[in-house]
Amino acid sequence: MAPSASRHVADTVASAEAGLRLDRWLNARLPDLSRTRVQALVEAGLVRVAGAPAKASRRLKAGERVEAEVPPPPPEELAPEAVELRVIFEDDHVLVVDKPAGMVTHPGAGRDTGTLAAAALAHAPAVAGVGGPRRPGIVHRLDKGTSGLIVLAKTQAAYEALTAQLARRTVSRRYLCLVYGRIRRDAGVIDAPIGRDPRSRVRMAVVTGGKGRRSVTRFQVLERFAGASYVECRLETGRTHQIRVHLASLGHPLLGDETYGRRRAAAPPVSPALLEGLGGVALHAAGLAFNHPASGAPVSFESPLHPRIARLLDALREAGRR
């Protein structure tokens, strides 16, 4: 079969295989795939047990029918895509972009097109070969549902300088967000390790027992409303979903966050249409500062609160005046 074709795998669980986890059973049938790739197939709903999607941790029973669709692997090199970018700053070394909510930073499970990386490759072909082939120029990332400032490197030297600054925690990243509930403290520091949620491959969580990486978020409450708070956050570390996980761990998930906000309190007094119009989570990367990788001079950039969040903020202020 041509390497670019999809594969369909179907088999019945033998008696000797009863009790095996679904992902381990699949790994035996698909030895050319990593366990991470197999788990990604399961999470994407491409694996069915007895005709229904199942979790990777499911224990199989003898006689059950398992079917899996294995799409072709993504190409090693990313293809450029002519997608419009809101460029805040650009020179021969760096590119600073104001990313819209809904755009994925780089290709990943389930999303290979329409990414910031592909758009940057079309806008600035020099980023090809900088960093990884599937993440050209990408120094750090923003979640799909987050809008705001992100910096890309246009040369390998700039990439190495910026990633070193991130490692030293000298890159300043300021975020604005709206969360459920009234945060009692005016300001604080959340110092709690984050790792993969043991109950879900697509979620992160505050974890204990040395299983997570140290994660530090500083926050300050800017305004409080009935059922919501307007908060500024500054990252000292840059873990996946860090702000979303940390604020949810306090009982104050972000507005619009379906992943970490399912157990949220009552919704604030705003139109449901405004919440639906977020197009992501109520999180905006408003400030970014670092030392320029070529000159060493400090540079900083600001992005005004995106209208999708500003409309919600205005509605909350108006409701408070009634």
Image: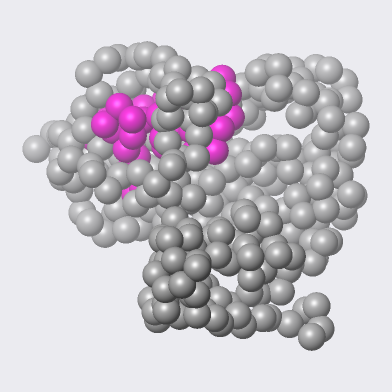
Q: Does the stretch in magenta take in 153?
A: no
Q: Is residue 70 left or right of residue 21?
A: right
Q: Is residue 176 left or right of residue 125?
A: left
* Residue 252 on the magenta span: yes
Task: Identify the residue at the far left of this view.
Answer: 322
Task: Please indicate whether residue 66 sits to the left or right of residue 131 in the image.
Answer: left
Residue 155, placed above or below residue 249: below
Would you identify the image quadrant in which residue 272 lies? Answer: bottom left
Above or below, 107 against 303 in this view is below
316 vs 197, left or right, is left
Q: Quadrant of the C terminus?
A: top left
Q: Quarter of the image for the N terminus: give it.
A: bottom right
Q: Residue at x 50, y 80 (%)?
A: 12
Up the image or down, 127 lies above or below 165; here it is: below
Extreme-front residue of the structure = 16
Question: Residue shown at 83%/43% (left/top)?
Answer: 131
Rendered residue at 32%/58% (across/down): 276
Q: Quadrant of residue 292?
A: top right
| Residue 250 spot, x, y in % from top left | 30, 27
Residue displayed at 28% across by 33% down = 252
Query: For the magenta stretch, what is the residue range?
Result: 228-257
Q: Can see residue 42? A: no
Image coords of residue 161 (percent x, y): 83, 26
- Inspect this view and state whether residue 117 appears: yes
